[in-house]
Image (spheres, rainbow, N blue to C red):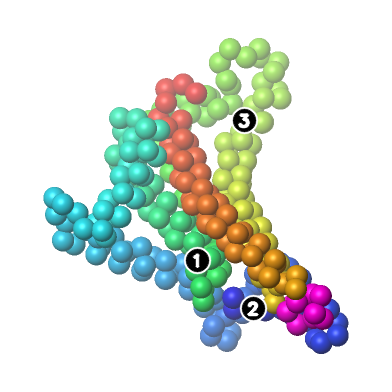
Amino acid sequence: MGFIRLAAEGEGFTPPSTADFNLPPVLAGNPYTTKPVLLVFFSVILVSIFFILASRKASLVPNRLQFAGESVYGFVRNDLAKDVIGPEFMRFVPYLFTLFTFILTNNIFGIVPLIQFPTMSRVSFPYVLAIFTFLIFHYVAIKHKGLFPYLKEIMFMPGVPKPVYVLLTPIELATYFIVRPLTLSLRLFANMFAGHLLLLVFILGGDHLLQGVIGLKLVSPFAFLFGIALTFFEFMVQVLQAYIFTLLTALYVAGALADEH
């Protein structure tokens, strides 16, 4: 997995911790060559090559590669953009499609042999994606409604008694400008971080048990089996988190385009 942290003989097992996510740079002294950074660039290349190949020789009767590419695109276009955003959905499909495939690929890296590191378990990457979404939906809202009407809509919800604004207005401002981007990014980060940490605990724990006495050796297969089961569960979580991040982005854009919210 790129990092195995077993204690010295006789000192017992040192469980994985947050330190195992701080990987050293591939090129000494260059902080931009860490494994997560390289995986981000690799994911861009991988996604680009896949969809170029899938669309290069498009035909009426698609082959398997074309069918896979069209299925992913159709899912994002119809289920995440069209159904959520409405009539103006098409101009947001490129961003939503890029967002979904990018997050999904980097999430799945966490269970790919020899890679086994989900890029989104480093919080800086979800932060950047959340900032892009944050800027897009606020820009759309300002362009659609105007700056001052948009701010007024956020700060002074209609139908609310005026004294309540003293409490409600700061909450609404914090929700739109702080809470939304934070929760969007931290949800993705926390799920990828926790899932990968659990996998490390059971896989490395099983390996450590194999080195123990006979009683511990008999228990080790159960740790490995549980680790394998968690891998399948983690795959579902990885797909779900890519979907949720993209869905929430589409919902925010839909709210920005709505005349009332």
> Is residue 17 placed above or below 184 in the rendered structure?
below
Along the line of sight, the residue nearer the viewer: 172 or 185? 185
Residue 127 image-quadrant placement = bottom right
Q: Tag on residue 109?
A: 1
Residue 141 position within the rendered picture, expressed as x and y whole percent measured from the top left:
43, 33
Question: In this image, 77 relative to 114: left or right?
Answer: left
> Is residue 97 placed above or below 2 in the rendered structure?
above
Q: Tag on residue 3?
A: 2
Residue 28 image-quadrant placement = bottom right
User: Farthest residue in the left direction?
Assistant: 60
Callouts 1 and 2 close, C-beta under 8 Å: no
Residue 187 position within the rendered picture, expressed as x and y whole percent measured from the top left:
60, 48
Residue in the picture at 32% in, 42% down:
77
Q: Which residue is mark 3?
A: 172
Along the line of sight, the residue nearer the viewer: 62 or 5? 62
Residue in the picture at 30% in, 55% down:
68
Type of residue at label 3? Glu
Look at the image and say whether residue 102 sits in the magenta stretch.
no
Question: In this image, 58 relative to 179: left or right?
Answer: left
Q: Report how far apart the C-alphas of labels 1 and 2 lie in the structure.
A: 15 Å
**Does residue 32 appear in this view?**
no
Q: Tag on residue 185?
A: none
> Is residue 33 placed above or below 103 in the rendered structure?
below
Q: Secondary structure at mark 3?
A: helix
Depth-wise, is mark 2 or mark 3 nearer the camera?
2
Look at the image and say whether residue 213 sits in the magenta stretch.
yes
- Residues in magenta? 208-217
Q: Report how far apart the C-alphas of labels 3 and 1 lie in the structure.
A: 37 Å
